[in-house]
Amino acid sequence: MDKKVRYLLRIIRFSPPLGIIIASFFIITLLYHEQNEEFKKEKLFLETEYIEIEKNTIYSNVNTIDNYIKNEIQNSEKSLKDDLKIKINTVHKIATNLYLKNKDTLSKNEIINQIKNSIEILRFNEGRSYFSIHNMEGVNILHPINPKFEGTSILNRQDAKGNYSVHQAIEIAKTKGEGFLSWYYFKPNDKSKEFKKIGIVKKFEPYNLIITTAEYVDEYERNLRKKVLNDISKIQYKNEGFIFIINGEGEIILHESKEILNYNIYKDNKFKDTREFFNRILSKKNAKSEGFLRIKPKITLGEDTKDEKIIYAKKFDDWNWIIATSFNLSDTKKITEKRKIILEEKYDNYKKNVFIYGFIFTIILLILSYYMSKLIEKKILKYKNNLEEQILENSNQKERLIKAQQIANMGDWQLDLKTNKSFWSDECINIFGFDTKDKDKFSPEYLKGVIFKEDIPSFEDSIKRCIETGSEHNSIYRIKKDNEVRWINCRGEIDSKRSLILGTVQDITDTKKLELEKKQKEELLYQENKMAAMGEMIANIAHQWRQPLSTISTASTGAKLQKEMDCLSDDQLYSALTSINNSSQYLSQTIDDFREFFNPNNNKIKEFNISDTLSKTFKLISSQYKVKNIKVIKNIEDYKLLSIENELIQVLINILNNARDIVLIKEKERKLIFINAYQKDDISYIEIIDNGDGIKEEIINRIFEPYFTTKHKSQGTGIGLYMSEEIIKNHLNGYLTVENVSYNFEGIEYRGAKFTIKINVN
């Protein structure tokens, strides 16, 4: 073991224990001082926190009372209305009973007088409330307080606010029969002004009368306030806390101490310390009027005290009251002192625990560090051995990599973008046939000296895109090595952090040769397919020319024979010449159709109608179908397609000729071929279906292979379907598929092969 390793192991062995001791001492000291500061802060926080808790408590107490009064107001108004409703219903029953009892024996006026006498003396709410009656025309029939109104019309009487209360009562009686309303009227013992009343009216149907009763709003509010004050006075809070209330004139109307009741905060000097605070709360309009006050008065609301207090007060706008309560800060100090004692005891225990557990923890860490250092020492020695083995393995791997590069004819390179210097592996140098002495000269400029001039622009563009956009550098170019053209594939990716391009070069000459051979074979196959198609076309021409030529021959021979016999009339001559001319035109049109198909200028992408394309296809092969009695069923949806029309026609002819041959071989009674053309989801579908019993399952996956055929050698070459698939896939960017299908046509079940051409519409 060398000195450096031994020195490192000593550091590992002794550094952790020493570090643990220093760290433990530092942590214990830090915890001690930190906890001491924390103790001071917590003692201060206890007082502040308790004050905040107490402030929140009195805030909650006052707002609870505020909500209680609001609920009482809402419930009391409802109770008043319920009470009025009970009373009006009681009087209505009295009137109804009197009517039912006397309707057959007494007159209307006599019964009304009995009703008046029965309810005139009825009073409630300490004699303030009574019952009155008037008819639908507004004529008063009963008014116990003002009998002078009886027999007079009060229809147009207005109250202090300009309301026509009798109008309202009549409207309620007419529309609802019963309902509540409010108006203003004098009190029996106070004629100085009108007071607001809440009343109820109920219609007495037999005589179309309206019975009314009401209560003064201020009176029921006065009673409500008495009830509320009585309820609040019974509430007790902790530490002898209580609620006190001051009215809008500054009078104390609720207090725990009876001596202080009815004192006025504005007039009595005992309240000079709180006067401004309460006055500010009372004077606020249309705003949240509340607040806290901290005071140390000699006398606070009738109590001799030297204690500091915090008061919370809130204005109750509906009644112009101040609802308030308070707490003594001396109570806070008593509670916080108790908690401070508990905290000090807890802190003393904490300090002891810090020292004890700190010592124990340090011992445990020292023991652990000893075993950890031993473990690390073993790991380092093991790592050292593994590293030596890894270095040896890397050397072997490097040799294997060099060997693999030689086998794959592939080398690696780097380009430093800052210095424009390159590193090339030995195999990379060997691929280009350079001299290793020129390693320092290698750069993109040096490389361009051996690349074919025609390939340099694409190579430069690829390098430029890689540097500017971060895209992969991928360039194929040619070089000349040992008087032979070699194809090189150069690839690379940029490492922006290190400003490098890392890449590989591979000699792909053999692959290129194979590609060229494959391309030549495909061209030969394509030509063979063209020749086969041309043979088919010539056969089609022969079929289509037989009948016109026969017609020409028959017409000319007949005319000549008739001329020799001197029996040729002008009409017969004209008929023969017309027949010859029509047949000649047909022959000419046939030549044009076939010439159009073989015209190389038509092998370009253009937009065409699929129905026109299928018509052209049928023109070229129709004679073969007619003579063989093959029926074609077309279901063609007309649409436009952007593609190479002539190549699509060639594929269609190949598939249709195969379908023709198969139905002829099977010798069916009905020879059927179906053509379907439609679009779906931007895909053009052309389906060709025969009734030739389908393709055997063991060979259906091979029918697109070159030179594969089920026909006799004299009937087929096996390249038609192969070339059809190649054209659809590589030239028309589509798919050609085949499957066996069963279908029903005109009530008969058939089975056959279904070829489907799928081409993107755009």
Image (tube, helix red, strand yellow):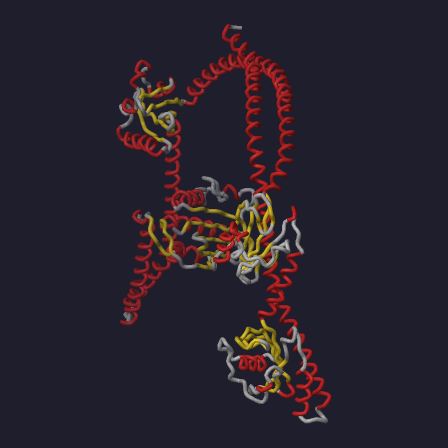
Judging depth in this view, the residue of 333 and 637 nearest the camera is 333
Residue 284, percent across and down?
Answer: 48, 57
Instruction: Decide if residue 665 is in sight here.
Output: no
Instruction: Decide if residue 683 is in sight here.
Output: yes
Residue 259, percent across and down?
Answer: 62, 55
Residue at coordinates 37% horizontally, 38% vertically from top-left? 523
Judging depth in this view, the residue of 173 and 119 nearest the camera is 119
**How many numbered tags mark residues here?**
0
Q: Describe residue 724's horizontal placement relative to residue 182 as left or right.
A: left
Q: Describe residue 527's horizontal placement relative to residue 574 as left or right.
A: right
Query: Where is 374 relative to 135, above or below?
Result: above
Query: Where is 252 relative to 147, above or below?
Result: above
Q: Residue furthest front?
A: 269
- Residue 354 found in image quarter: top right
Judging depth in this view, the residue of 454 and 82 nearest the camera is 82
Judging depth in this view, the residue of 221 and 34 nearest the camera is 221
Residue 215, percent across and down?
Answer: 61, 74
